[in-house]
Amino acid sequence: MTSDRYVVLGLAPARSGWFDAVAQWSNSAAIAAEFIKCVSVEEVRARLASGRRHSALLVDAASPALDRDLVQTALEAMTPVVVVRDNAHPPTALLGIGVATELGPDFNRDDLLEALATHCRPVGRGDNVPGALGDPVPAGWLAQMYTVCGAGGTGSSTIAIALAQGLSSDARNSRRVVLADLARTANQAMLHDALELGPGVQELVEAHRLGSPDPEEVRRMTFDVPSRGYQLLLGLRQPTAWPALRPRSIDAAIEGLRRAFQVVVADVTGDFEGESEGGSADVEERNHLARGSALRSSVVLAVGMPGLKGVYSLSGLIRGLVAAGVNPARIIPVINRSPRNPRARAETARALNALLDSTSATLPLATNAIAGSLATASPLAVPERKIEDVLREGAPLPGAIGDPVTRAVEIVSDRLADAAPASASPQRVAPGSLGLWSDAEFETGNA
């Protein structure tokens, strides 16, 4: 006789009929399962993080805690999620966010046992670590992504417009370029005279919270900007709306944009502090739009201004990007509204290089060498232009702004693509090719 049985976590609103029924089946040994009632999502997360194996997480579809983040947390704990529908919640595309299966509102004992036998594993006395829940899903098409960031007043949103316009003029992109306003303080709606309410990043993230919308549905959440050749995804209506956007839903929304377009240009806030830097998980979640965009981007444009304060702030922005995990080789410093005098531009470049060089010691050791190479490059100078009327009329930006930004991004992208290894598969090492290492050599420092 085997001692294996299922260990099932349950989460449901008060007075759910199936909740009590499953508990009765468990207590009367009608099913070989231990059913653990959880009164809150916090208890569910605590039990999943406890290290104990669980066979399944049974969640009511009416529970407000059911979303992509909860499903992903359960999967990371090797616990499949089974959703119980009710009459108010018809079948949905929950399988697309990782849910193993769904049960009808009037499921019986046999239905539950069949679902557990098909998708879950019993827990034995040895409590061995289970294998993977399934084969990894192959990644499909993902567009190139570029992020533009900067402090308020530096013109980073205008640079993002110029970059999206420049990339959309390339026939290879098939006019499938989207400018996504992912800044916590969104300005693109104002710059595009789109102040009326409409779908934007909040609706996009919400659509990915419990599902995986197809590319056409994602494209319908954007607006056409025909004069500049790209699509626009509006940003947050209020900066205080960020708590409603959960991190994994944000990640899924960004991936959804990359599946729906040829190129994604993200306009983000220049704040990348995370939990490891400041010790606050809330701060990292507040900055997740910016951090998630920058870490997925082929190139990140860090925009600053000339002058003492502007150059100092730009060096801090670059340090924040590197501390967040962005490869410094992918960062392009941009001096917006740069002076026309070549001597003044050179002085600005020297000041930025000196600041980056002097602060490289504060960066992680693994990035010091790369940060040093970044400090030797001259920042991209974008000349000052009066574009208030151009933005007000919705006309294309002058080429003096967009052309140098687009060329710089393409050059860096091509250089990084050429430097990428041809294959990431393991390589065979011939015996003896790594040299010798004896205890004597190690002690004398000659190894």
Image (cartoon, helix red, strand yellow):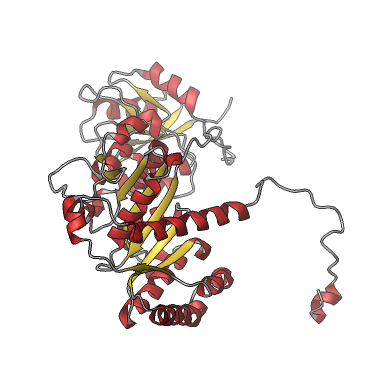
* Vertical arrangement, residue 400 with respect to residue 133, above or below: below
Instruction: Return the x and y of residue 162 as percentages of the image width and height.
Output: 33, 55
Instruction: Return the x and y of residue 327 as percentages of the image width and height.
Output: 51, 62
Q: Locate the C terminus by quadrant.
A: bottom right
Residue at (28% x, 28% y) in the render = 20
Residue at (45% x, 42% y) in the render = 143
Nearer to us in this view, 321 or 64: 321
Horizontal side of residue 157 vs 318, given as left or right:
left
Number of numbered labels in the structure image:
0
Horizontal side of residue 445 vs 68, given as left or right:
right
Instruction: Return the x and y of residue 171 as percentages of the image width and height.
Output: 43, 40
Horizontal side of residue 377 vs 241, given as left or right:
right
Asked where in the image residue 111 lies, by quadrant, the reply is: top left
* Vertical arrangement, residue 111 with respect to residue 343, above or below: above
* Vertical arrangement, residue 275 with respect to residue 82, above or below: below
Is residue 183 in sight in this rendering?
yes
Nearer to us in this view, 68 or 65: 68
Instruction: Return the x and y of residue 214 as percentages of the image width and height.
Output: 36, 30
Q: Locate the N terminus by quadrant.
A: top right
Is residue 74 in sight in this rendering?
no
